[in-house]
Image (tube, rainbow, N blue to C red):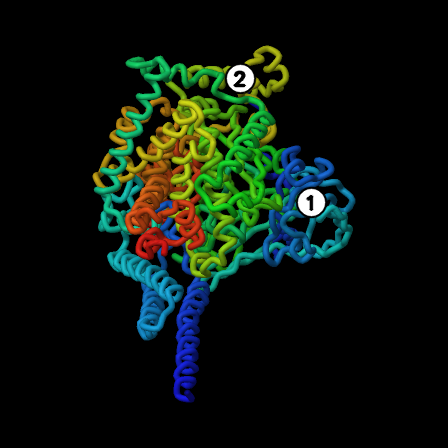
């Protein structure tokens, strides 16, 4: 039975207006330290008196950690009197620091403990000779969220692309890793004439607020809507030639956002095209196969996954109650990266309805090594668009691409090795489609 | 007398000027090479083709090669000492290698946009030449794909017969299924981490007392190596790895074993220790570092000698006080079989155009009991066409160098001196080592 929820009503209007002027958002600190947990084994081979602190594997040149004098082999003990006894605590503590913050820290070297203080350096920025990069912010409710705009060195009103990322809580502000798929795609689109625009979720990168994990689906949709409105008003952007690239869950948000603020076209890569539970069922079998399960094992896996997740997604039944009834669900349930409200609201979306109402151009892309999303749902998105707006929808299956737009030979290889090299076929496919649509 | 003194002084001066010239050319080469930021070719051929720079940059690199070829040719070779001659041979090898690389890169770039097939070199334009070049660059020696294929097949046949003898001795003649079942017995797997560490410590103690059987007396001074689990090892993590003191934060060399699933195969422990620790990688690194290594070798990664040495020493388990029963030998042959099959599969895929199904079929027919890693290994042979060859090609070439040395020296041949001289040369390309004859 379908559960209709009252929060399906768009709540975009409930949120505060955006500020169109440039916002000052302090840069996060660039601590630049590679850490490793100290275990009893580490303590044994390093002759440490206790399993305490984290092991410094190295520091990044130009970072705060380097300036603070930390070196490979040091045992880093505290920051601002907070004990750092594992990498997760270290990352969480450092994430809160902003450029210019003064802090104290202690570390152990050759058996001696040192306590010192230092000032945090700002995180580096992307910088290229051939394109301009602007670090701005969008105000959503009371929060400033980091936006990064890449712009060709050209005059006049330019076509623009807004990138909406996947469901996870990760930053798109990665100046130290410009080989990521997202940056390779966006920076190369800028080199071919497009302004690109991306935003970090609350609590990620420089963005205020968070934790991102707890943001629900509608709240997240609203951040993209506000960001899109800001993009439309940039004086160097042609508001009639704006496209959205929605990656993974970003492909779900894209038609939802476009419903409120129209865009010329949408590229949906590795996304969901049907009811969430139907997608879930389809993709579980692909995930089982990517994990090299036998057909029988895969069937058991899919069956149990559905039995465990249906009450959670559809009815919002707490995981504890599901586990009490079905203890074998323990191998499936757990932290899904986002909280229950997010999944419940996603479950209520009518995605085919959104796609059939959308009157712009659509390119639905699936990679042959992507086992997180299914080819059929991308074909279905294109077909759904074409039903109401013939000729607007295009489907593309890209050989040798995984869910993260990387080069991968098969779903099994992608699952096993987590490839990291961006597949330029994604870029070429999108570039060609944009040209065909006179962007 | 005065004249004689003049001649002596002149000769001495001439030698010094000449000596300075060889080293000046090499120093200049190193400095200019570093400034040009030339990326290492890496293992994955698809990633390599992504980072080939523009033709203008390749032209600069070709000019650089030409500049140093001219400088090297201009030196007066007649007055070189043997050490200078060896340095010049090494520089010439790297100049030749880079000329070939940049010439092929230029051809690739000028040919226009090319798809890089995900399933190997076979279908790629000029793929055969690229495969052969990858073999040379990764192994440090030029070997034809046909020879690699033939050698791989002969090694697989040889190992099958060794394993069949053991199977027979253990009472499983004509019962391969029963034998494989027996090898999966829980008694072959240690499940307590501390027990494994203690057992490796015992192996180390035995090896240290037997080192003088194959190495000169000073070999017993090889520094200690710590043993620990491989943090975050997964189902596809290799059996073990070596991290030199320079490559970790523990302050000492470390040998990490795979304890994924809290089990470790006892049959593999002898060869694993010899390969990763003593007299394999740890011993090799210590010998190289103790011998004032050639600065040029710091610039390049020579997988052929590095992995070849660690594989070569695996054959001397009995001399090192190990391989004391059939099962330890079997463990050695089981992994040697994996490495030998990689030769056949790599040449099969990249030179003979094998499909993945053909490669899988070969694996299943020839590598019993290792179905769980079949897909991983075939993917590795596909993506890393030449790295997978380094173990066997390196060991084979070291045996060939040793045979040549033995033939030349006859009764004077001393294997211990051979090992010292081979290792103290540093990690040179195999072709250079072969040409120098380990004098």
Q: Which image quadrant: the N terminus of chain B?
A: bottom left
Q: Is residue A331 visible?
A: yes
**Residue occupying the far front of the picture:** B1
Report the Cα–Cα distance between label 2 and label 1: 43 Å
**Is disc 2 surrounded by few (<14), some (14 to 19) or many (20+) residues within 10 Å?**
many
Q: Which image quadrant: the C terminus of chain B?
A: bottom left
Which image quarter: residue A49? top right
Residue B330 is marked as: none
Which chain hosts label 1?
A: A
Q: Element at badge 2?
A: helix
Q: Is residue B423 above or below residue B354?
A: below
A429 and B187: which one is in front? B187
Residue A241 spot, x, y in % from top left: 42, 52
Which chain hosts label 2?
A: A
Residue A104 spot, x, y in % from top left: 76, 51
Q: Is residue A92 visible?
A: no
Please tell me which of labels 2 and 1 falls first in the chain: 1
Q: Is residue B87 above or below residue A405?
A: below
Q: Element at badge 1?
A: strand
B228 and B55: which one is in front? B228
Residue A58 spot, x, y in % from top left: 60, 50
Badge nearest the viewer, 2 or 1: 1
Residue on which the image places disc 2:
A308
Residue on which the image places disc 1:
A75
Q: Are marks 2 and 1 in contact (CB under 8 Å)?
A: no
Residue at image point 35% right, 13% down: B171
Residue at image point 60% right, 18% down: A317
Residue A173 spot, x, y in % from top left: 55, 49
Viewed as shown, does residue A130 lie left or right of A6? left
**Is disc 1 surrounded by few (<14), some (14 to 19) or many (20+) residues within 10 Å?**
many
Residue at image point 33% right, 46% down: B411
């Amino acid at each position: 039975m379908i559960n209709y929820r009252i929060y399906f009503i768009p709540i975009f209007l409930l949120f505060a207006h955006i500020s169109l002027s440039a916002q000052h958002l302090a840069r996060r600190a660039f601590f630049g330290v590679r850490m490793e947990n100290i275990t009893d084994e580490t303590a044994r081979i390093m002759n440490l008196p206790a399993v305490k602190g984290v092991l410094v594997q190295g520091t990044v040149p130009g970072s705060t950690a380097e300036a603070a004098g930390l070196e490979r082999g040091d045992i880093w003990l505290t920051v601002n009197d907070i004990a750092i006894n594992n990498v997760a605590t270290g990352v969480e503590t450092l994430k809160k620091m902003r450029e210019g913050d003064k802090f104290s820290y202690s570390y152990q070297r050759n058996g001696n403990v040192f306590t010192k203080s230092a000032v945090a350096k700002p995180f580096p920025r992307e910088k290229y000779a051939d394109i301009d990069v602007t670090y701005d912010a969008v105000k959503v409710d009371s929060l400033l969220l980091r936006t990064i705009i890449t712009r060709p060195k050209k005059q006049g009103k330019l076509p623009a692309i807004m990138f909406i990322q996947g469901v996870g809580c990760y930053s798109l502000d990665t100046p130290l890793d410009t080989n990521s798929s997202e940056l390779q795609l966006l920076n190369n689109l800028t080199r071919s004439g497009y302004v690109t625009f991306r935003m970090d979720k609350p609590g990620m990168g420089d963005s205020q607020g968070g934790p991102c994990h707890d943001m629900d689906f509608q709240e997240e949709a609203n951040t993209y809507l506000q960001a899109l409105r800001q993009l439309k008003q940039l004086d160097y952007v042609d508001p009639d030639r704006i496209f959205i690239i929605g990656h993974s869950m970003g492909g779900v948000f894209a038609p939802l956002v476009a419903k409120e603020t129209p865009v010329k076209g949408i590229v949906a890569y590795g996304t969901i095209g049907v009811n969430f539970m139907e997608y879930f069922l389809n993709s579980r079998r692909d995930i089982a196969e990517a994990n090299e399960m036998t057909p029988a094992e895969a069937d058991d896996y899919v069956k149990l996954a559905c039995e465990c997740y249906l009450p959670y997604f559809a009815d919002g039944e707490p995981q504890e109650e599901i586990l009490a009834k079905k203890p074998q669900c323990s191998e499936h349930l757990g932290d899904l990266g986002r909280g229950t409200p997010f999944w419940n609201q996603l479950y209520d979306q009518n995605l085919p309805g959104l796609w059939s109402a959308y009157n712009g151009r659509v390119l639905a892309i699936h990679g042959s090594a992507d086992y997180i999303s299914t080819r059929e749902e991308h074909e279905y998105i294109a077909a759904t668009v074409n039903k109401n707006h013939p000729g607007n929808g295009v489907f593309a299956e890209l050989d040798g691409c995984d869910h993260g737009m990387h080069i991968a030979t098969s779903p099994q290889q992608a699952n096993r090795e987590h490839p990291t090299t961006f597949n330029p076929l994604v870029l070429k496919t999108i570039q060609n489609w944009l040209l065909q649509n006179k962007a | 007398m005065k004249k004689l003194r003049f001649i002596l002084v002149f000769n001495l001066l001439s030698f010094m000027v000449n000596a300075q010239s060889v080293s000046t050319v090499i120093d200049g080469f190193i400095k200019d090479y570093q400034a040009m930021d030339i990326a290492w070719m890496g293992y994955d051929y698809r990633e390599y083709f992504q980072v080939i720079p523009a033709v203008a940059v390749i032209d600069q690199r070709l000019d650089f090669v030409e500049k140093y070829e001219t400088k090297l040719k201009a030196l007066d070779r007649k007055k070189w000492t043997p050490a200078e001659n060896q340095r010049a041979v090494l520089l010439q090898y790297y100049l030749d290698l880079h000329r070939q690389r940049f010439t092929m890169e230029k051809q690739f770039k000028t040919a226009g946009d090319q798809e890089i097939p995900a399933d190997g070199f076979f279908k790629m334009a000029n793929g055969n030449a690229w495969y052969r070049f990858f073999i040379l660059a990764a192994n440090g020696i030029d070997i034809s794909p046909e020879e690699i294929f033939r050698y791989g097949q002969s090694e697989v046949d040889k190992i099958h017969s060794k394993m069949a003898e053991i199977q027979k001795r253990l009472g499983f003649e004509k019962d391969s299924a029963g034998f494989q079942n027996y090898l999966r017995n829980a008694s072959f797997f240690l499940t307590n981490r501390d027990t494994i560490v203690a057992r490796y410590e015992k192996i180390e103690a035995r090896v240290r007392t037997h080192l003088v059987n194959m190495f000169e007396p000073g070999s017993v001074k090889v520094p200690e190596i710590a043993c620990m689990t491989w943090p975050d090892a997964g189902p596809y993590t290799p059996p073990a790895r070596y991290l030199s003191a320079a490559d970790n934060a523990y302050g000492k060399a470390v040998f990490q074993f795979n304890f994924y699933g809290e089990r470790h195969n006892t049959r593999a422990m002898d060869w694993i220790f010899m390969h990763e620790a003593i007299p394999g990688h740890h011993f090799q690194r210590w010998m190289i570092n103790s011998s004032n290594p050639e600065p040029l070798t710091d610039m390049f990664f020579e997988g052929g000698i590095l992995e070849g040495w660690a594989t070569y020493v695996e054959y001397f388990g009995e001399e090192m006080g190990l391989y004391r029963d059939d099962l330890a030998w079997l463990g050695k042959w089981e992994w040697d079989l994996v490495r030998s099959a990689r030769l056949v599969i790599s040449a099969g895929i990249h030179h003979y155009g094998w499909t993945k199904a053909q490669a899988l079929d070969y694996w299943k027919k020839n590598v019993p009991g290792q179905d769980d890693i079949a897909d991983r290994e075939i993917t590795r042979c596909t993506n890393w066409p030449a790295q997978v060859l380094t173990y066997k090609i390196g060991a084979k070439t070291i045996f060939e160098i040793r045979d040549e040395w033995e033939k030349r020296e006859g009764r004077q041949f001393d294997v211990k001196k051979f090992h010292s001289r081979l290792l103290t040369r540093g990690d040179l390309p195999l072709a250079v080592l072969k040409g120098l004859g380990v004098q």
